[in-house]
Amino acid sequence: MSDTQHTPGPWRIGDAGFTVFGPPKPGALPETIAPVKNRANARLIAAAPDLLAALEALLDRDPAPPLEKIGAVYVNARAAIAKATGE
């Protein structure tokens, strides 16, 4: 839908739970996306690329998407919500 301007996902929460990192890079440390004050914020920030992808898929311009695609979009959206909420 748009040109990506941010660090591509997946993003993950560090072991201490208060820093969000970008994807691993061969031979280099992962990029720090955000230091945060609590785990709930870290979960939401780490889920941002998944949430964006789920919303972009929901807004796909296909006027009549096949049922298989609708099911996959639903599953991805639920997974993104679970990642953001820690459930």
Image (cartoon, rainbow, N blue to C red):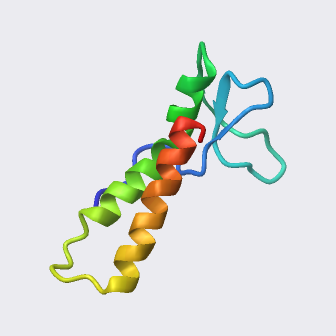
Question: Is 1 located above or below residue 46 in the figure?
Answer: below
Q: Quadrant of residue 3 in the image? A: bottom left
Question: Is 5 located above or below residue 17 in the figure?
Answer: below
Residue lying furthest right: 27
Residue 4, how many percent across, how many down?
Answer: 39, 52
Q: Residue at x 15, y 79 (%)?
A: 63
Q: Residue at x 29, y 57 (%)?
A: 2
Question: Is 2 located above or below residue 45 in the figure?
Answer: below
Residue 82, how many percent across, how many down?
Answer: 54, 46
Between 35 and 57, which is closer to the camera in this rendering? Answer: 57
* Residue 16 as seen in the image, left or right of residue 55: right
Q: Which residue is drawn at 43% across and 57% down?
A: 77
Between 81 and 26, which is closer to the camera in this rendering? Answer: 81
Q: Which residue is drawn at 59% across and 41% down?
A: 87
Tell me the quadrant of the picture where the N terminus can be found.
Answer: bottom left
Residue lying furthest top: 37
- The mark tally for this picture is 0
Between 19 and 5, which is closer to the camera in this rendering? Answer: 19
Residue 32, how many percent across, how many down?
Answer: 65, 31
Residue lying furthest front: 87
